[in-house]
Image: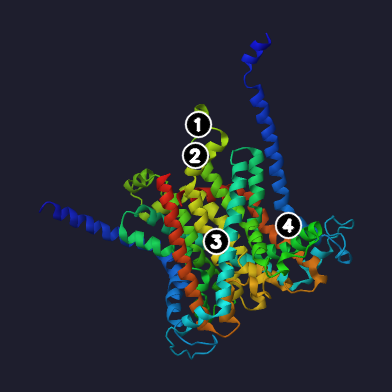
Amino acid sequence: MTNTLPSRKLKAGLGAKTHLGNLCFLLPTILLFSIVVLIPVIQGIPYSFTSWKSIVSTNHPYNGLANYKYLLGNKYFRMSLKVTFSFTLQYMFLSMLFGFGLALLIHKASSFNNVCRTIFFLPFTTSVTAGAIIWSYVYTDIYGTLTGLVSPLGLPNQIVPAMALMASWRDMGYAMLIFIAALQTVPKDYYEAATVEGANVWQQFIYITIPNIVPAFTTNVTLLLAWGLRTFDLPSVVAQNMQEGQTTAMYIYQSIFANNKASLGQAAAIILTIILIVLTQIVTRALRRLEVEA
Amino acid sequence: MEEKLHVYNPNTKTHRRKVRNERIRKLFVCLCVVVVLAPFYVAILYAFKPATEITSNRLAFTKNPTLENFRRVIFENPLFGIGLRNSLINTIPCVLILMACTSMAAWVLARFDHLRAYKILYAVLTLGLLVPFQCFVLPLYLNWYNAGLVSTNIGFIIARAGLQISISLTAITGFVKTVPRELEQAASIDGCNRFQLFWKIVFPLMTPINTTQLVLNTLFIWNDYSTAIILLREKESKTLTLAQIQYFNGKTTELNEAFAFFILAMIPILALYLSCQRYIISGITAGAVKG
C-alpha cells in the first residue's frame, strides 16, 4: 500500500502537466463553441419566462410559464408543429427510400457507378434557396406540362409532400453515401455461403444485407430527423404565404424578428429543442437495440 | 456430344441472365440520373433563354441561346459582386479556422477518451448536433448586436465556425481513433514537445479527413441561409446565397436573370465538388460507419 503511493503521486504530477497541455489544444474550440452555442443556449432559457416583446426594448418582466401555456393552446403554433412532424416523416421516408434504393443499385465499385455517385450527390451541393426556386419551376413546367395539373406548391393539402420531395432530392445523396459505406462492409463470403446453401437473392437481402447495415439506418434516421425538424430555409422560400406549409422553425423566426414576440419565440424554440432531443433519444435507443440483436 | 457441351458450360444460361440483369440495372440507373438532373436542366433552360421567350419553350431548349442574362447579372446587378466578395471573404477563413481548431481538439479528445472529463467535454462540444439553431438565435443575435458584429464578415465567420464545430469534431475524432499511436510515441521519445508532435506528425496524418471536412464545410458555409439571414442585415454584407432571395418575390421578367444568377453562384462550389468529390465520398462514408 505504501508502495503505490509515490507512483500514484508521480502519475498525478505527470497528469496535471499533460492535462494543461491538452487544454491548450482544446481552448480555441471550447472558446468558439462557448461564445457561439453554449452561452447563448443558457442565456436563452430565462428569456422564455418573460413577456419580452420587441428585441430592441430593454424591458422584459418575468411572467412565469405564461408563454408555454399560451403556445400549447395556440392554433398557429400547434399547426406549425403538425406541419413540421408531417414534413419530417415524409422527408425521412423519401430520403431513405431513394438513398437506399440508389445505394443498392450502385454500391459495387466500378467507374460507371462512381460517376453515378457523383451525380446523385450533386443536388446536395446546391443551396436550399436556389434549389427551392428551381423546383417551383420544375412543378409548374415539367410536372404541370406532363400532367396538366397545377403546382402542388400552390395547394394547401399538397404543399408538405411537395416540399418533402424537394428536400429529399437534395439530401438523398448524403443518405445514399452512408448506405453505400455500410453495404461495402458486409463480408462477401456471407453471400457466397448463402448461395451454396441455396438461398435466393431476396432471402439474402432480408437475412444478410438488412441485419448487417442497421448502423447505417441509425445514422441516417438521427441525421435526417434533426435536419427535418429544424427545416427553415425551404419553407421560408416556398411557403411564405401559406400557413399550411409553415414549420415551427419559421414560427420561431417570425415571432422573434417580425412579430415582436421575442420571448414567445424563445419559448417555442425551447419546446422544439426538447422535442428534438427526446425523439432522437427514443429513435437511437430503439435502433441500437436492433443493432445488438442483429 | 451436345450433352457433354452442356456439362462443360453449365453457366451459359445463368451467365446470359446476369448480362441481361446488368443491362436492366444500368438502364434504370441512367433513368434515375435523368430524373435527378431534371431540375438542373430547368435552370439551364431559363438561364440561356432570351427574355422574349419567357413563356414559350417550356421544356425544349431555346433556338436562340443567349449569354445576355449572365452578362446582366455580372455587370448590372451590384449584388452579384458584393455577394461573391462576401462569400469568399467569409467562407475561406471560416473553413481554415475550423480545420485548425477542430483537428487540435479532436486529437486530444480521441487520445484521452478513456477519461471521464474528456468524455463529458466531447459530449458538450457535440451538443450542437442536437440543439437547433433556433434555440439560441435570439441571445446570439443580441450578443452580436451589442458587440457590433452584426452585418460584419468577422461576426459571420465566428458564428458560422462555432456552429460547425459539433459536426466537424465528430467526424475528425472518429478518424483519429483509427490512426495508430505508435508514430506519436516514437516521436515523443525522440524529444518532440507536444506542439511539434502535433504539427509535424499528427496533423499530416489527418490530411484525408481534413480535406474532406474542408470541402464539406465549404459546402455548408457557402450555401448557408439560416444564419446569414439573421446576422447579415445590411445590403453590403450579403453573401451570394442571401443575395439570391432578391428574386423570391421578383417580377417574372427577371426570371431568366434569376436562373443565370443561381448558375453563377453554383459554379465555384461545383468546381470544388467535382475536383474533390473523391474526398467527400470517402469522408462521409468514413464518418458514417463510426457513427
What's the distance in space between the residues labelled 1 and 2, CA to CA?
A: 10 Å
Instruction: Say if labels 1 and 3 share a chain.
Output: no
Instruction: Say if labels 1 and 2 share a chain.
Output: yes
Residue depicted at x 53% and y 48%: B285
- The residue labelled by disc 1 is A194
Above or below A57: residue A213: above
Above or below A79: residue A61: below
Residue depicted at x 49% and y 59%: B167
Q: Determine if residue A29 is in view.
A: yes
Residue A251 is drawn in which quadrant?
bottom right
For the residues labelled 1 and 2, say whether their Cβ atoms are less than 8 Å apart. Answer: yes
Give the side of residue B142 with respect to residue B75, left or right: left
- The residue labelled by disc 4 is B39
- The residue labelled by disc 3 is B95
Residue A44 percent location from the top left of the image: 46, 78
- Disc 2 residue type (three-letter): Tyr
From the viewer's perspective, is the residue at label 4 or at label 3 nearer?
A: 4
Residue depicted at x 48% and y 91%: A59
Residue B130 percent location from the top left of the image: 47, 64
- Disc 1 residue type (three-letter): Ala
Residue depicted at x 55% and y 69%: B157
For label 4, the SS is helix
What's the distance in space between the residues labelled 4 and 2, CA to CA?
A: 38 Å
Q: How was this image coloured?
A: rainbow
From the viewer's perspective, is the residue at label 4 or at label 2 nearer?
A: 2
Q: Determine if residue B82 is in view.
A: no
